[in-house]
Image: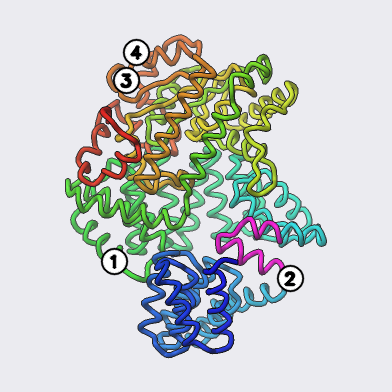
Amino acid sequence: MDQREQALKDAKEALQARDFERGLAIAEATLADGPGDAEALYIAAVANRYLGRFTAARQFLERLHAQVPEYGRAWQEAAHLARAEGRSDRAIDAYARAVRFNPALAASWRALCELQQAAGRSGEAARAREQEARLAALPNELVAVTHHLHEGRPLRAEEICRHFLRRHPDHVEGMRLLAQIGLRLGILDDAEFLLESAAAFEPDNVQVRLDYIDVLRKRQKFARSREEAEALHRRDPHNPLFQSHLAIESMQTGDYERAFALFDEVLARLPDDPATLTSRGHAYKTVGEQDDAIGSYRAAIAASPGHGDAYYALANLKTYRFADDELAAMRSQVDRTDIGFMDRVHLAFALGKALEDREAYEESFRFYELGNRLKQRQTGYDADKMTAELAAQAEHCTNALFGAKAGSGAKARDPIFILGLPRAGSTLLEQILASHSQIDGTLELPNILALAHRLRGRKAGKSRYPQVLQDLSPDELEKLGLQFLEDTRIHRQDAPFFIDKMPNNFRHIGLIHLILPNATIIDARRAPMDCCFSGFKQLFAEGQDFTYGLTEIGRYYADYVGLMEHWDRVLPGRVLRVNHEDVLDDLEGQTRRMLDHIGLPFEDACLDFHRTERAVRTASSEQVRRPINRSGQGVWRRYDPWLGELRRALRMRDNP
């Protein structure tokens, strides 16, 4: 135990002994060395509340919320403070946030029940009472698992949960929690197996069924997730929750007519539900109905003025321009202290875009920076760890490895991998190629990333990948290639070729080559400042945590270029590099070059890519529905005074 850990242990013991002055003194001494220490901030807030120093307690909590905005215990303490001050409405809101971020906080459920009952909200009080009773019935080990999972310690949660399940292998809630841990760690196949088993043990467990639908969607098994959603819907066709899930799963399978009908059913019962209005807007956007999408997003904002998701959805159309009253509304909302964390993140990014469109670049950058700073605190991205992970690929995927494994893998030519960084033009390349009669466009498929996860093994901190590639036999490599083809078949139509445009697959080109030696690999490359700044401005639905900081995205780009140079050395000619700027300069020439590399004849439809009707789910969905343009080139130059950090991270010399 180091000095800090001992000090915090002493501070907690002082609080338990009701020696609040001593506990506070230890916490303040710890904060003198590390002003952002979350545990010390929490102890200081608790001590000040018990000492009756409410203003000081609130100040420590504000610092704590800024440091770890989704820390459930911090919101529970904020609620305790509001209750001590006699502000019941604020206490209810804070307790509700506490259990949203950590549903194992029994004291918050109990307090919610009491306060909601006193406020005449008997239905909500009953639900809080049910949750408290459910926690009380759980084994202590699983309550601890829930705490660890929701406080950012998934590996510790996994350790306790697996130990519990060894003694109670059929415990459904234990299986469900282990599946949640798997989802958090990206081990989706294990999560699917656990939830499928849990559903078999308790077919009527609605939460298990909802989690199962979620993992099936994340694994992009859309037909299966829709079947599960249909089964829930049949139980109670008028349940808005079941209707919403079925609408979302219908979208994923391309049945937008059914999705819109279900959204309308939900809105007939809940006409001002902002989440449903926003989801319907996303569906309209995906099918290219921009005016309807805008109308649905605006309706969500009218229903809930602080609903940042809808504001950001408008900004993310890229072609939308905010009116003066909308800009003023966003400014007022982002300064509220009572809105949700992600609402504030969404509003910050939306304001960045709105002010960029008005050429107010310094203020625009301030809001982009705010949004990125908030997200970075949430994700805890470690740039050093990523650098080491990419270096391991170069260390173990060598000429010797590929020479020894020559001739292995599945021989199919079907897959076309478009990879690189997000915001590098990969969606444009996909739209061009998917306009060819012999190529199906699909999605950013997770299969290669999931395979890499499985190959890492189960020991925390002791990855076997990529060195395990040396141990795989020709039969095993062929089997993995065939499995990829089988698992991705659901996303294809009838064309002989299909595209997987997961950008992060560049990390695993060695694995791709070994299991699918005849697949096409295209590196979508964009000039570093354009690419990185575009990523910095983008709030991604999930993943891409490296984009939330100028240093972080600059380092990632530099590491990516270094790894691609390695692939070029050990697999010469294997990867076709397509520079975004070259596509803008010579669309037909670069299109012919890609088709020649794949082995397909040129078709004029590829040049009219913006006329191709298909669902596009990435941030560039509206841009690829317009003819080719240069609107995104050189945008970073308007922000150049504030991008020194990015330049340094890119180790830039002459070429921006």
Q: CA distance from mark 4 to mark 3?
A: 9 Å
Residue 488 in the image: above or below residue 125: above
Q: Which residue corresponds to the image point at 41% horizontal and 79% vertical from the top-left?
A: 90
Can see residue 123? no
- Residue type at mark 3 is Asp
- Which residue in the structure is indicated by mark 2? 139
Residue 159 rendering spot, x and y as whole percentages: 70, 57
357 or 537: nearer the viewer: 537
Within the magenta stretch, is there residue 155? yes
Q: Which residue corresponds to the image point at 63% horizontal and 59% vertical from the top-left?
A: 236
Q: Which residue corresponds to the image point at 67% horizontal and 73% vertical from the top-left?
A: 134
10 Å neighbourhood of mark 1: few (<14), some, or many (≥20)?
Answer: few
Residue 606, numbered label:
none
Q: CA distance from mark 3 to mark 2?
A: 61 Å
Quarter of the image for residue 123 reads: bottom right
The numbered mark, 4 or 3, whose residue comes first in the sequence reads 3
Q: Secondary structure at mark 1?
A: loop
- Which residue in the structure is indicated by mark 1? 335
For the stretch drawn in magenta, the main secondary structure is helix
- Which residue in the structure is indicated by mark 4? 589
Q: Which residue corresponds to the image point at 47% horizontal and 22% vertical from the top-left?
A: 522
Q: CA distance from mark 1 to mark 2?
A: 42 Å
- Which residue in the structure is indicated by mark 3? 582
- Residue range highlighted in magenta: 138-160
